[in-house]
């Protein structure tokens, strides 16, 4: 894979496997946030307990949740017998049309919930399988050996959901261009630029990325790739390489 291939690739599995060969593997944090960013694209078909598990994995990536909290959130995505997963409310809704059951995350126990939490649209079987694998992956302390499984899981998650950003676009947002590692001059990290990046990161305010580009340019930034990335519409998730660079995150 050369640079042109990377910029146009649509096979996230192949791209993930290429990164270590280019000596630019994703850090455990970035790999986890890549998973989370993809999962967030389909929150509208995920049940609350699954969204909660993804959110705890995201917090864990940034050191804001413990391993026990993350794995506990993953485990409540399983049936009580822990032998199978009950990922989407649509499954339980089919079994019990009058209502659904969900976990009370405060007490880690079952309680009745309103049927309004059911997914808004049918969920393809492959997507369900993808979430099963995703929750198992996100519940792990280390993802260092999981890139292949991550890619398979993500591919299944997006199958049939044509309105979702592609995995490859999300991966490029997180990993950047491994053929042209960016260089950030300390002078570009002005108080304004850092504050903007922090707001974008914390609030997922990716619509403010063009404003960040303006702040970087005013500070003297000459990295065309950074400015272009901020000003180009597309898939942006927490872990975006430009935001991470400004904030000093790896």
Image (tube, grey):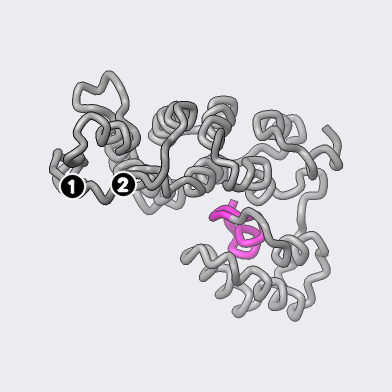
Q: Which span is picked out in magenta?
A: 237-250
Residue in the foreground of this view, choosing between 112 and 98 = 98
Residue depicted at x 57% and y 53%: 239
Where disc 1 sits, the SS reads: strand
Where disc 2 sits, the SS reads: helix
Compared with 25, 195 (above or below) is below
> Which residue lies most toward the top here?
83
x, y percent for residue 224: 82, 64
Tell me where residue 187 sits by quadrant.
bottom right
Tell me where residue 247 sits by quadrant.
bottom right
> Which residue lies most toward the front here?
97
x, y percent for residue 1: 82, 32
Label disc, if present, on residue 113 of the rendered structure:
1
x, y percent for residue 155: 58, 32
Residue in the foreground of this view, choosing between 90 and 17 = 90
CB within 8 Å, label 1 to label 2: yes
């Amino acid at each position: 894979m050369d640079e042109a291939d990377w910029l146009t690739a649509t096979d996230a599995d192949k791209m993930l496997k290429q990164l270590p060969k280019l000596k630019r593997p994703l850090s455990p944090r970035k790999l986890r946030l890549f998973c989370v960013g993809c999962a967030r694209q389909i929150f509208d078909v995920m049940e609350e307990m699954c969204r909660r598990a993804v959110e705890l994995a995201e917090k864990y990536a940034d050191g804001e949740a413990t391993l026990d909290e993350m794995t506990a959130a993953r485990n409540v995505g399983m049936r009580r017998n822990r032998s199978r997963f009950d990922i989407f409310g649509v499954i339980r809704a089919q079994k019990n049309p009058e209502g659904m059951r969900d976990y009370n995350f405060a007490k880690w126990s079952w309680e009745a919930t309103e049927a309004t939490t059911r997914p808004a649209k049918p969920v393809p079987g492959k997507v369900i399988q993808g979430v099963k694998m995703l929750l198992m992956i996100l519940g792990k302390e280390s993802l260092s050996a999981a890139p292949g499984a991550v890619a398979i899981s993500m591919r299944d998650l997006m199958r049939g959901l044509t309105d979702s950003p592609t995995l490859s676009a999300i991966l490029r947002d997180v990993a950047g261009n491994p053929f042209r590692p960016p260089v950030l001059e300390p002078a570009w990290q002005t108080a304004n630029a850092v504050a903007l990046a922090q707001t974008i990161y914390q609030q997922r305010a990716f619509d403010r990325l063009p404003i960040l580009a303006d702040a970087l340019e005013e500070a003297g930034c000459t990295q065309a790739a950074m400015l272009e990335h901020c000003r180009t519409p597309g898939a942006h998730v927490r872990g975006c390489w430009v935001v991470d660079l400004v904030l000093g995150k790896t």
